[in-house]
Amino acid sequence: MNRKTGFVVVLAIIALGFIVGVYAGVSSVPGADSFYAACPVFLEQIIQSAAGDVYNYEAETDFEEPKSYYIVSYSVKGDSIFSPVLNDVPTYLLDEQENIALQRSVWDVYTNLIPAEDRQMVTRFQVFSDGYSNTLAAVSPSYEDPSLWYLEVDIADLDDQEALLFTLIHEYAHLLTLNEAQIVPDIELALDYDLDLLTEKAAACETYFTGLGCSQPNSYIQAFYNRFWTDINDEWGQADRLQYDGDEIAYYNALYSFYKQHQNQFVDDYAVTHPTEDIAESFAYFVFSPTPHGDTVRDQKLRFFYEYPELIQLREHILKATCSMTE
Ligand SMILES: [Zn+2]
């Protein structure tokens, strides 16, 4: 569930099709986007921070997964974090481990961004580090009870504010779309994730199987899948299967060429990782982009979220919190 940026060689600063001024004056519904207008430059920078070709491996064939350490893990109740559990860390991470104020400042950013009632599934806050860049943040379900989730943030990436904000919202989208009101969490898969079990579980699920559990018929992911994935899922599945063969580069190359084939359907190449990543990445673009008016599937994916009044409200909350950071 993490959004990796480690193998991004160049964060291309792409002039996105929707440039702030284009929509600023549009007043039709849902184009009236006064929330976007509050700090358009900062929001555009947040979007640009996500515009890397993460699966473009042509220039880089020797990527190695960096070593990652859990530094401290907090219990969560409402807005509070408490009872820190310290992990064994290498000496160079001791300063980060002792810096409680810094750890709390990240949690404060998160609680400002996401309303309390929308993050009740988060029961632990874990600070980790795999060095600068790489994984900025992640969410993962608890093994004991996959309806409970952990939020994880890399303490080494706090200076990259735009990328961190984008990633926190991408990660939040997983909680929004995979919580137990949306899917039925599968405890067996949470304990022992393998292809055979996954295939068996997917076959037994009458709705879309997310990988973590069977979708509820009226869930966001089911609606998103029905509308945007049914005609591409078989082709995508051929690329996806390669990850189980142990050749990561072949898998990434296949994903990238799938992306190139269907580029106007995706907000960026990371979104082709999986339908659950597509909805998470599209949600983050929905939050930080002006309302799109184009006909591409990519634009339709962003407009998808405007069909849910509670998500429009959530977007407004996140944008207010985001823009207040620039004041
Ligand atoms: Zn993700």
Image (tube, rainbow, N blue to C red):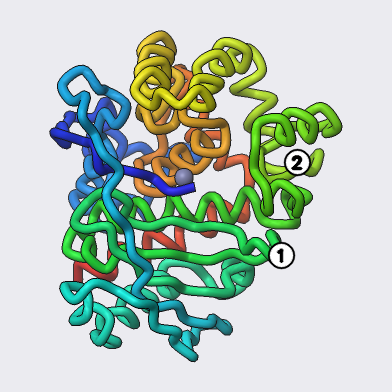
Whole-percent x, y for residue 260 in the image: 36, 13
The response on whether ligand 1 sits within 8 Å of label 1 is no
Mark 1: few/some/many CA within 10 Å (<14, 14-19, 20+): few
Question: What residue is drawn where x is 77% and y is 41%?
Answer: 214
Locate the C terminus by quadrant: bottom left
- Quarter of the image for residue 270 reads top left
319 relative to 197 in the view: left or right: left
Q: Position of residue 202 (x, y in %)?
A: 76, 31
* 1 horizontally vs 253: left or right: right
Report the residue marked by disc 2. Answer: 215
Residue sitting at x 74%, y 35%: 197
Residue 178: image location, x then y, percent = 64, 50
Residue at disc 2, secondary structure: strand
Q: Nearer the viewer, mark 2 or mark 1?
A: 1
Residue at the spot of label 1: 145
Residue type at numbered disc 2? Ser
Give the camera-side residue of 240 and 119: 240
Q: Nearer the viewer, residue 178 or 67?
A: 67
Which amino acid does the dot numbered 1 rest on?
Asp
